[in-house]
Every structure is written in structure tokens, then in C-alpha cells.
Image (cartoon, rainbow, N blue to C red):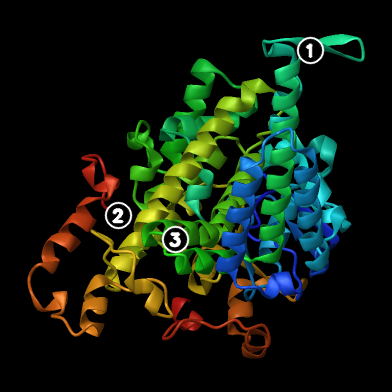
Amino acid sequence: MSTPVLDVRGLAFAYPDGHQALFGVDLHVHQGERVALLGPNGAGKTTLVHHLNGILTGGAGSVAVSGLPVEKKNLKEIRRRVGVVFQDPDDQLFMPTVREDVAFGPRNLGLRRAELDGVVMAALDRVGMAAYVDRPPHHLSFGQRRRVAVATVLAMNPSILVLDEPSSNLDPASRRELAEILVSLDITLLMVTHDLPYALQLCERSIVLSDGVVAADGPTYDVLTDEALMRAHRLELPFGFDPAATR
Amino acid sequence: MGAGHGHALHVHGHSPVHRAPAHLKILGLLGFMLLVVATPGHWHSAFGLWLALLLTVVVVARVPFRWLLPRLVVEVPFVVFAVLMPFIAHGPRVDVLGVAVSESGLLAAWTLLAKGTLGVIAGLTLAATTSPPELVRGLERLRLPSALVQIAAFMIRYLEVVADDLRRQNIALASRGFVARDPRHWPVLAKSIGALFIRSYERGERVHLAMLARGYEAVGERPTPSRATPDGFVGKAERRRRAGGPSRHDNAADEPVWGRAAGERPVDHSPGRMPS
């Protein structure tokens, strides 16, 4: 098989205060896959995400992105390849206008003027926010801010898009719009979520992280319909949702 | 940016100094500082006495000198100024190690250094033996205007929240390939600090609205009543009700308060704000 876009091997990590969050995580994500990372609160999902682009390092094991190991000397390229969209768009959007914010990443990569502008508009176009390019981000609705946050990362032309709780705090229409955008992107995607119907809608494959290890890895439909597995890892479908009804 | 922890200056302990009521300690610090400041610079033995007194308190409080000494660095700007004084002051000169320096400047430098050091040690000792919430309660008992007490309390409450915001923002910056290496990156840091300021300001407004929603009213606040209640922030209407007076909630005078509060939000002034 080809080199996986994301190759995590035996990743273990303990915080300086002694709390161990990861106990040997192995996972692979291949080109073009959309994968959901599921797990209860405190399972180590955020810790894992922070390892994917080298925010956290120093534990045991290894992470490689399209064959490039996550190491200090590669950090710049790694952060271009791994686009992380954080849960709170306000953490990500801090420039006075949407244009400057989306330009921030590619500018760090050395793009200037016409080329930079082209990248910015293309990225905003892909999330349907091109009309808002000169607005201040904090005047946008929450759903719009999340879409701009996705654009800020797309502008860096990443190999994989990592989304932390993409559907949280979105109203149903924004949630659906974001899903349509994500499907249209045609990009490798890892999505950390508690929103199991969203995982089923968007991701053919799911990985369950529980107590710092991978507890399950398989087709999303099979994971969500495995009652014993779901119960064992504090995963619950929302009231009235039946995966079988979506087939 | 590591100064995030709001209780970083407190040294846990059970000494008599730790257990003493906070308002007495605050008064003690104030009185001591007034004495130190009022002491003429040439009364050298008096400064020895003040230092001995202060060190006794430090020892009784079991505040380690290892903890105290590094924190004295906050005094450095004053030390720099004190060192310059003998050279820039006018008046008769005296020779010190072969260098002619101003006599009055020398005395002023010594005075600044002695008083400053005593003040910093005394302040650190209070901080080390009194937790921030205790300090706030002490100030309240000393009848500091409640608006000031509340500002101090909020600062303590939200310092860590804001520090956490800052940490997450820095992670988001780094994730988009940002590394602050040289002054060319300062504009980015300035903008991120600006964004943090706006977010904290807006959070302040949300907290204020949440307080209003629970009957808090700060307009024309009088400093007295909240001290009588165990929970700090009690609205005026509630206090009036407790005092047996008519409740403000009974009449329509409440309306302008809510209307104004909602109108205060700056985001509502923007014609360009888009609905979700």
C-alpha cells in the first residue's frame, strides 16, 4: 500500500504533571479517506491532535505525515501539511479582517501579493465565504466563523485536514452546510467528534480512542451498531437516532 | 507569558501570620510602609530595625528565603534608577572609589534602595501568607468601595481564564506555521494580543449580562450592603427587599436597566453583522 498520509505508531504521552493521556496509539489514515476519531471526554483525543502537528512532542512513539516524521526540524512543513481546525474559531481568527486572517498561514509560508490573494480567495471560495473577505471575523455568525477557520487552513494546501469538534455549537442548517462543504473538499480528513450521526454522515471509517488507546477501528456503521463496544467506551447515539434507518 | 497562574505568589502554610485576619495584615502592611517612607534617609539604625522586624515576620511565617529572593527582581527598575542618581544629581561632590558623585544623590539612592527593598519584601510577605480571595475579603472588611473590590475579585477569577485563552491562541498560531523570531513578527503578536483584549472585553460584557440576569445592579452602587451577605454580588433590589423596602422588581423602572444593558453590546452597532 502507498505511504499513509498519517502514520502514528506506538504514541504514548504523559503531561509534565504526570497525567498520562496516551498509552501507545497506532493509527493510519490513507489518501482520500475521511476518518472520524470518536471517544469519551478525557480519552486523549485533543492530546493526539496536538501531536499530529508537533504542538506536543517528546513522548514515546512516532508520527509521520506523508512519510515526513514530526520532528523539530520538519515542523514548518508538518504544519503546512496538517491543517488543524480548532474547536473555538475565536482561537483561530484574530486578524482584523477575514482576508488578513486567511492570508496569515500562506504568508508565513512566504507567499506575497497576487499569489497570496489568489490563494486566499480560492480558499474562501471553497467554503462559500468569498463575499465576506473584508469583514471583521468577530462580526460573522458562529457557523460563518467556523467556515472561515476551515478556509484559513485550506489556504495552506494541507495534505490532511484535522477538525476538532466541527459541528459543536452549530445550528442544524450551519451543521448541514459545513457537512456539504467538507464532502465537496475532496481532501483527506480526520474529524474528532462526539456527534455520531455527523461521523456516520461524513466518514466511512471510525476510530474509537478510549483511555489513551485505540479501542476500535472499522467502518463507522459497524462501530455505531456494536452496542457492547459503544457501551464500554461511553459512546451513546442521540435519542431517536438509528444508524440502520440511514441505509 | 508564563505568569498565568493567579495564585502563583501564595505560599501554602499554617503559621500565625498565615492565620491572621487578612484585613489586619493589610493594615499592618500599610502602617509599616508609612513608617518606612516617613523615616529620614540618614537614620540608618532605624532601617536596620525595620529590616529586623520584617525578617522576624518572614521567619515566623516560614516563607523560605529561597522563595523570596528571586522575586525581589521586580525591584530592578528602581535599582537602576537608584544607581544612576549619584551621577545625575547636583550639589556638592564626594569621592567614592575615586569617582566624584553627588552627595545628595548618594543619600537619595540609598533611601530609594532601602525603602524600596523593605516595601517589596513586605508586599511579598503579605502575598505569600494571604491567598487572593482572602485579600479581597480583607479589602472588603476595610470598606474599600465595593466596585474596586469586585474589580479585584474578577481579575483574580478571570486571570487564569484569559491566560488559558492566550495559550490556546498561541497553539492555533503555531499550527499555522507562525514562529515569533524577530521584530518583524511583532505586528502579529500585537494583533493577537488585540484580539485577546477584545475577546476578554466581550467576555466581561457577557459576564455582566449574566449578573444582571440574576438581579445584579451596579448603577449608583453603595459600598456597604454586600459585606453583610455571604455571596458577594447581591443586587440592590435584593438588598432593599432584605432591608424591608419596596422591591425594584415590582415596578416598571427595571425596564431601562435591561434596555441599556442590551444596547451596550458593541457588536449590535454594526450594520454588517450577519444573522446565523
Residue holding disc 2? B276
Instruction: Give the answer, above or below, for where A90 lies relative to A227.
Output: above
Disc 3 to disc 2, C-alpha distance = 38 Å
Q: Which mark is residue A184?
A: none
Q: Where does the image place residue A172, in percent across and percent down from the top left?
A: 35, 65
Q: Where does the image place residue B42, in percent across and percent down from the top left?
A: 74, 33
Q: Is residue A161 visible?
A: no
How crowded pointer 2 is (Cα within 10 Å; few <14, some 14-19, many 20+) is rated as few
Q: Residue at x 57, y 60 (%)?
A: B27
Instruction: Give the answer, above or below, for where B190 lies relative to A91.
Output: above
Q: Nearer the viewer, residue B9 or B91?
A: B91
- The chain letter under disc 1 is B
Residue holding disc 1? B101
Query: Is residue B194 left or right of B57 when viewed as pictured?
Result: left
Whether callout 3 and callout 2 share a subunit is answered yes
- Return the disc, 2 or 1, that comes first in the chain's sequence: 1
Q: Residue at x 55, y 58 (%)?
A: B161
- Return the disc, 3 or 2, that comes first in the chain's sequence: 3
Q: Where does the image place residue B14, in percent across and percent down from the top left?
A: 75, 76
Whether callout 3 and callout 1 share a subunit is answered yes
Identify the amino acid type marked 3. Val
Disc 2 to disc 1, C-alpha distance = 70 Å
- The chain letter under disc 2 is B
Q: Where does the image place residue B255, in percent across and percent down from the top left?
A: 12, 65
Q: Secondary structure at mark 2?
A: loop
- The chain letter under disc 3 is B
Which label lies toward us, 3 or 1? Answer: 1
Q: Residue at x 14, y 68 (%)?
A: B254
Q: Which quadrant holds residue B143? A: bottom left
Identify the amino acid type marked 1. Val
Q: Nearer the viewer, residue A122 or A133?
A: A133
